Image (cartoon, rainbow, N blue to C red):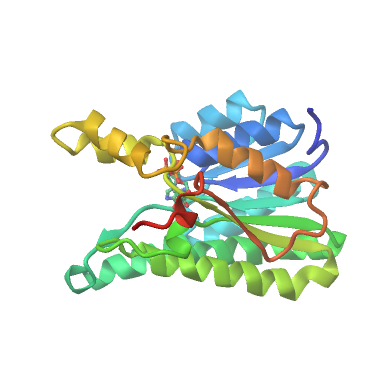
Amino acid sequence: MAGRLRDKVAIVTGAGQGIGEAIARAFAAEGARVVVAERNEATGPAVAGSVGGLFVRTDVTVQADVERVAARTLESFGRIDILVNNAGANVFFRPHEMPREEWRRCLALDLESAWAMAEAVLPAMRARRAGAIINIASTHAFRIIPHTFPYPVAKHGLLGLTRALGIEYAAEGIRVNAIAPGYIETQIARDYWAGFPDPEAERARACALHPPGRIGRPEEVAMTAVFLASDEAPFINAETIVIDGGRSALYHD
Ligand SMILES: NC(=O)c1ccc[n+]([C@@H]2O[C@H](COP(=O)([O-])OP(=O)(O)OC[C@H]3O[C@@H](n4cnc5c(N)ncnc54)[C@H](O)[C@@H]3O)[C@@H](O)[C@H]2O)c1
């Protein structure tokens, strides 16, 4: 089925690689015009070019960049239907060993930028009384893995933001939802495994943690983003969809 996002205009942050790239490709395949809001000036234009979209160099932690990408989208396409807050990064420490600057960096990128981007697109969405905002959270938004501080603090906050904005703007036709992926095979994961003496054994260990015996793929997150962004989910709001193959439902005895 193609054309599920026909005529819609979508901004996807951090779409230069990984999950964001998969979302940009899936959106374009469904007929959306995609704005790649990415800070990487090599990957961003490459993805935008290959999906016939627009690249706007954006560091989502810089307010002027956030305002510019919203303005450029409106100049180019006249509307903003969809925002995907995907840009993010792992910031993992034991709490007492974390430099305070890392707390600020994590909260700025993994939480505050989502509000800044939402704030920038809300006027256009409110004016048309329509819009879908999708925040890419994580299973770290519900569960704690030791030594990953403060990433889960930011991701828990992202669910709070999702619910707060979803409630606030529901009557104006704007839906705000989150996707909580589990372990997804992206460059981050491959780089992480590469740090072990036996990267393939570490990959196998990750797969074994999941009931289906494998980890997820970026395209599987993108399929859910298409659904939430489309007119197929008109009454889903302030909700989070977990994509982890059932891992977080598994009881370890
Ligand atoms: N990979 C996983 O297993 C996994 C699991 C759960 C949640 N997530 C979340 O999914 C999202 C994407 O993760 P990924 O694995 O695809 O990561 P990735 O590192 O492969 O891609 C992140 C992209 O965001 C861009 N980016 C980083 N900081 C930016 C900034 N300040 N402004 C604009 N762009 C910026 C990077 O350049 C990169 O293109 C993140 O929010 C991450 O927390 C990932």
Q: Is residue 53 left or right of residue 218?
A: right
Name the residue nearer the viewer: 29 or 105.
Answer: 29
> Compared to 36, does 161 lie above or below?
below
18 relative position to 199: left or right: right
Residue 57: percent from the left, percent from the top?
Answer: 52, 44
Q: Is residue 82 above or below residue 203?
A: below
Indicate the position of residue 137 as horizontal and vertical percent values: 51, 57
- Taking depth in this image into account, of 43 and 98 the one nearest to the observer is 98
Residue farthest to the front, as pictured: 253
Residue at 78% across / 62% down in the picture? Answer: 174
Q: Position of residue 2 (x, y in %)?
A: 78, 28
Residue occupying image coordinates x 84% and y 71% = 171
User: Would residue 55 be visible to someone looking at this image?
Assistant: no
Q: In the rendered view, tell whether residue 1 sits above or below residue 133.
A: above
Residue drawn where x is 76% and y is 71% of the image? 169
Asked whether 230 or 248 is in front, the reply is 248
**Residue 157 falls left or right of residue 52:** left
Q: Quick one: quadrant of the N terminus?
A: top right
Residue 173: percent from the left, percent from the top? Answer: 84, 63
Q: Is residue 158 above or below residue 137?
A: below
Question: In this rendering, does residue 116 appear at all?
Answer: yes
User: Which of the 4 image quadrants contains residue 105?
Assistant: bottom left
Residue at the far top in the pictured view: 50
Query: Total marks drawn?
Result: 0
Q: Residue at x 25, y 73 (%)?
A: 100
Determine whether, in the image, residue 172 is placed left or right of residue 113: right
In the picture, the quarter occupied by the C terminus is: bottom left
